[in-house]
Image: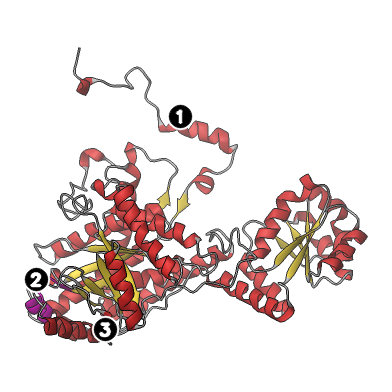
Amino acid sequence: MSGPESLSLAADFPAATDAQWLKLVDKILAGADFEKKLVARTYDGIALKPLYTRADWHAENDASGLPGGAPYTRGSTALGNTVSGWDIRQAHGGDPGVVNKAILEDLERGVTSILLRTDGAALDRVLAGVMLDLAPVILDSPGATLPAATALMKLLTARGQQKVFAGNFGLDDLGNGLADIAALGAAAVEIARDFPKARAFNVRGTVYHAAGSSDAQELGGAVATALSYLRAMTAAGMTIDAACGQIAFTLATDADFFLSIAKFRALRKLWARATEVCGADARTAPVSACTASRMISRRDPWVNVLRTTVACFAAGIAGADAVTVLPFDGSELARRVARNTQVVLQEEASLAKVVDPAGGAWMFERLTDELADKAWAFFQEIERAGGMTKALPLVAEKIAAVQAERARNIARRKDPITGVSEFPNINEADAAPISATSGAGLKPIRLAEGFEHLRDLSDAFKARTGQRPRIFLANLGAVADFTARATFAKNFFEAGGIEAVPGAGGSNPADMARDLKHSGAAFAIICGTDTGYAGNAAAIAKALKDAGAKTVYLAGRPGELEVPLKAAGVDEFIFMGGDVLGTLERAHKKLG
């Protein structure tokens, strides 16, 4: 009997082909366009297909190498995080006494390093009792980064810990809109001399991501920023290899699982190429992850736990050297959950036990390569404009264009936000506070802000009147006739804090007008079938308007009925793909 290496379990079956699969798919799609239905596109224009095969990535010509080998796509070291796991990094900032207590508590309960948001004031109080030789601190300053770094240098010198401190002084002014980096280069020379285990620069791709960038823009911006710092350090007298040793990166990781994994793998590849072009022997740098601040919602904050868990999982799969999970809100419980999310993924899910588990997967390899290509093109565009010191206005303009597109998709719920634009809890208590984000020259945004503003208006309306603004669901026909569109309408309006009051159903305009008055609703929406609309919607719309409805809506596209329905009193039509946010904003304006 031949050995197991010659056993082919599929030998007796004919090979499946793409054409066979596409034939089955076409049958299911029943004439619908394959590209529109099943192929998604990222904000960088990369196609995400429903199925990847060997043709999408040629393993026999694998350019990703092995973990620990060039181009370091698969990790900077051969063993990755399998020995001790990634660095569990917790973010802290605020009142010195409160922060110090929280830091000490976290370090006792699984956290291994601290991301400290500070301007450098009262560092001795903030870090009292913290063993800085065992618990590295990474600075994250909201404005100019050199003052905080200088304060930490003085503290470490006073404690005699210059030679043992292995943290990061957090120098990174370009993302904060500050372009004079000669002083940063000089500071890096001092840090390299006096703090041999530390790094001077933490290049934050997070500031670009927080402003709404695409993934390639975040990567290209981070690499261009790091290259500017390399130039500043070599101009200050450092060798290129010594300068590379002062660079670390932090990228955002969000609820887009696939892209988050590809992004970290792509950065390692990009930085290896950039340092190679610079003539450096050092080709790697630590790459940390921070769950994205822009995806955190104030409304239904518990959903943030799910978002950050997905993001942390992606960072672990991608081989991030350190991970910071932002709390779901500003509470102590949220900080504990953020910490323990990482502990569970490492110790119970064993996520760090495999080096680059995404390696070799056709989809991840293809996506990594395509994202790296897009990011390199953006990096080259920045370099042609004079480097990041001169190109920040260009970068801001490019990011703003992507964010404008994303905002349109959020407004139409093409990009849904669970608990906010989709499946909102209308009876939720006041919005929860959220943790602070680092400052930047690029204005940070949150994806949920538009809808949350409407929910705030709803809260204010309730405070004035004793109840939320309401919309009456004028349900047309039997339950089976109106349920689908009534459910859609309820979800639609409650995303803006307008409470849906369901009607009993039927077709009598007088009954619906009476129920509208009893509901206390300022608005009404007709929900039913297209057939029902043709027979009864006009009369119902007139009755609702006569009964005092400020606005009468109809759920669904009106088609050829649009003109007569508008003439009868229908003001607006809501449907899949419509401007949800704009419709809700107009409704609130009518409420004053």
In the image, the segment drawn in magenta is 189-199
Residue carrying label 2: 242
- Identified by mark 3, the residue type is Arg
**Label 2 secondary element:** helix
Along the line of sight, the residue nearer the viewer: 255 or 25: 255
Does residue 294 appear left or right of residue 489 in this picture? left
**Label 1 secondary element:** helix
**Label 3 secondary element:** helix
Residue 156: mark: none
**Residue neighbourhood size for the residue with mark 1, other residues' Cα within 10 Å, grouped as few (<14), some (14–19), many (≥20):** few
Mark 2 and mark 1: Cα distance apart in space: 55 Å
Q: Is residue 158 magenta?
A: no
Among numbered discs 2 and 1, the one appearing first in the sequence: 1
Mark 1 vs mark 3: give the one in front: 3
Does residue 60 appear left or right of residue 263 in this picture? left
What count of labels does the image hold? Answer: 3
- List x then y, in percent, for residue 580: 63, 65
Residue carrying label 3: 125
Among numbered discs 3 and 2, the one appearing first in the sequence: 3
Quadrant (top left, top right, bottom left, bottom right) of the C terminus: bottom right
Mark 2 vs mark 1: give the one in front: 2
Mark 1 and mark 3: Cα distance apart in space: 67 Å
Among numbered discs 1 and 3, the one appearing first in the sequence: 1
Quadrant housing residue 401: bottom left
- List x then y, in percent, for residue 180: 24, 86
Residue 195 vs 72, above or below: the answer is: below
Quadrant (top left, top right, bottom left, bottom right) of the N terminus: top left
Residue 19 vs 374, above or below: the answer is: above
Residue carrying label 1: 20
Quadrant housing residue 28: top right
